[in-house]
Structure formats: C-alpha cells, structure tokens
Amino acid sequence: MSYTYKELGLSTTKEMFERANKNGFAVPAFNFNDMEMMQAIVGACAEMGSPVILQCSEGALKYMGKETVPLLGKAAVDIARAKGSDIPIALHLDHGETLEVVKTCIAAGFSSVMIDGSHHDYEANVKLTKEVVEYAHANDVVVEGELGILAGIEDNVKAEKSTYTKPEEVEDFLKKTNVDSLAIAIGTSHGAHKFKPGEDPKLRLDILAEIERKIPGFPVVLHGSSAVPAKYTEMIKQYGGQIKDAIGIPDEQLRLAAKSAVAKINVDTDGRLCFTAMIRKVFATDPKEFDPRKYLGPAREEMKAYYKEKIATIFGSEGAYKKADK
Ligand code: G3H
Ligand code: 13P
Ligand code: ZN
C-alpha cells in the first residue's frame, strides 16, 4: 500500500517552523524505533500542546519496515486527536542518504525528509540536495538539508571529526537548493559521548548568530542535541549496564539555541537511554518477569514523562497548540 501524508492526517513542518521562529521556541524532533516510543512521544507532545516531528532514521525504517512506519504515524495523529489535541505531527526521514530512500519514504507517506549531503564536497551536496528538493516539492513534501559535519556514530552516519558550518556558504546553499530548513554544525554531535571529560561543553553560538544574520527568519536545525542525563546513565550502571564518560549538551546551551533561529532540535540518544534504563530496572528488580508489557510499559511511561519535562524546560514549545487531556 502507498499513502500520501495528507491521507494519514500528517503535516509538513512549514507552519510549525513559522510559529517556532515567531515565538522563540523549537519543535522537538524525537526519533522512534517502535510502537511504544511513538506512543510515548505523541502522548507527551499532545498533553503539552507541543507540535512534534516523529523522526525515523534509515536504520529505523529498515527495522520497522516501510509498511509499518506510516501507519504508526497515522496512529500518532489518531492518538492526539482522540485526546482532544490539535498538534500538528510530521513524519520525517532522518539522515536520508540517497534520492532512492527519499522516494521510498514519500511514497510510503512521510511528510518531510532530510537529505544529508554533508559528507560530500560542497558542489556534490548542492547537486544531490537540489535533486531531492525538486522531487519532494513536486509531492508537497518539505526538505531539510545539511551544511557542516557532526561527529559521532549512527547506523548510517559515521564521522570521526566535526567541521563547523561556514556561515559564508549558507545563503548560496539555500539559493541553489531551495531547501525548507537547514541543519548546521556548531559543536553538537550524535550519541552519548559529545565531549571529553574535562572539556568545556560549549556550543559555537557565535556561529549560529552569524548564520541567523545571513538568513533571518529561516528555520535552522540542530542535530545531536541530547542532554545525556546522569539520572539515566547512572540507572543503567546501577542495574548492570556499561556506559562510560557519557556527556551531553548542557540544558542552558539548548535553551539559548531554541530561542534563536533554531526551529527544530533533534533528540534520539536521550530516549534510548531512558527507555533502556527503565527496562534494566525491571529486569534487575523483578528477574522472574517475562511479560513484555511489564517492562515495555514502564519504559514507555518514563519516556513520556521525561519528554514532557524536556518540552517544558528546553524546547519552550508547551502550549503552542491546544493541550490534550491527561
Ligand atoms: O542521528 C540519527 C539517529 O540518532 C539515528 O540513529 O541510525 O542508529 O537509528 P540510527
Ligand atoms: P542525539 O544522538 O544527540 O540524540 O542526536 C539525534 C539526532 O541528531 C538525530 O538526527
Ligand atoms: Zn542527526
């Protein structure tokens, strides 16, 4: 089966980004890998009245399957509406690498795609991004491009070293590609190890300010923005897991970014840590338990509560739309 995102009740990011930039908040873009994570994300956002971008990586698409992902997106919309919330929900491809995967996602029912050409040289990035934008716009789908390289490791995106975005390139990139939003590199990175112990965990907010001066009002995207909370890394260790020297982005840095041109902030690692910490706790404290609902349920509840807290304290997107009943 093939759907358009409109048939699924999904939205693009256009209106939510306009509202975010006008009102000084950032839209949360939370990655999901399964039904429970989707339910935690939409539950949190609907109850807080926050717009949301349900984000699916190529790895997550392979894991869940292209038949399942769009219907989880539709379920998210139905859950929000059933709770009495009117929040817009976008289904977004995270770090798409090729035009082929973009085509697959748009045919499946995604409303937004990222084409990550940041690992190519500038001209090749422009060429690939432009091709994707032409295809996506013909289908009313919006596109996020990227300039600059984030360090860190995911299934598809591996980089040893980061390269900050060059502010002098952004106007030209926007003009040549016609992207709808732009991911930049200002010192964030993917995963749970964003800084070395002893390093000053600071973002280059000066580069962000310069980019904002070059492209006023244009929605900027921040990847690699997990806070990596000690409460979950400690819990993982307490219940038998191994995680060393995990350091995330300080809340205050993210709050400053959310108030600026940054209209979308990506968080994946925090959800993984929180979900895993809770499952470990159940396994360790109740070793006889083998009903998946008894460990996935508490993990889902914890993730929802934690994301509500993040919306209130980091994103500033609470109450941008009607709040749902609890
Ligand atoms: O930035 C990307 C996400 O953290 C996705 O990670 O490719 O392991 O699903 P993944
Ligand atoms: P984190 O690894 O910091 O959660 O970043 C997620 C991300 O950028 C997804 O695209
Ligand atoms: Zn990312």
Image: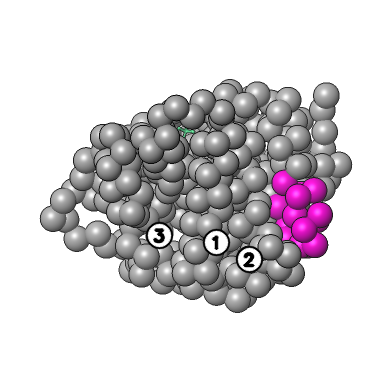
Q: Is residue 87 magenta?
A: yes
Q: Is residue 191 magenta?
A: no
Q: Earlier in the sequence, mark 3 or mark 1?
A: 3
Choose top left, top right, bottom left or bottom right for residue 256: bottom left
Residue 119 tag number = none
Where the C terminus falls, by quadrant? bottom right
Say how many tags the image has.
Answer: 3
Q: Which residue carries the number 1 mark?
A: 308
Q: Which residue carries the number 2 mark?
A: 48
Choose top left, top right, bottom left or bottom right for residue 88: bottom right
Q: Eyeballing the image, is 118 above or below 201?
A: above
Instruction: Name the residue type under label 3.
Output: Pro
Is label 1 in contact with label 2 (beta carbons under 8 Å)? Answer: yes
Q: Position of residue 77 (x, y in %)?
A: 76, 49
Instruction: Name the residue type under label 1.
Output: Lys
Neighbour tally class for label 2: few under 14, some 14-19, many 20 plus, Cα within 10 Å? many
The part of the chain drawn in magenta is 76-89
Q: Which residue carries the number 3 mark?
A: 167
Secondary element type, mark 3: helix
Q: Is residue 194 left or right of residue 112?
A: left
Q: Earlier in the sequence, mark 1 or mark 2?
A: 2
Residue at figure coordinates x 72%, y 46% from the top left: 76
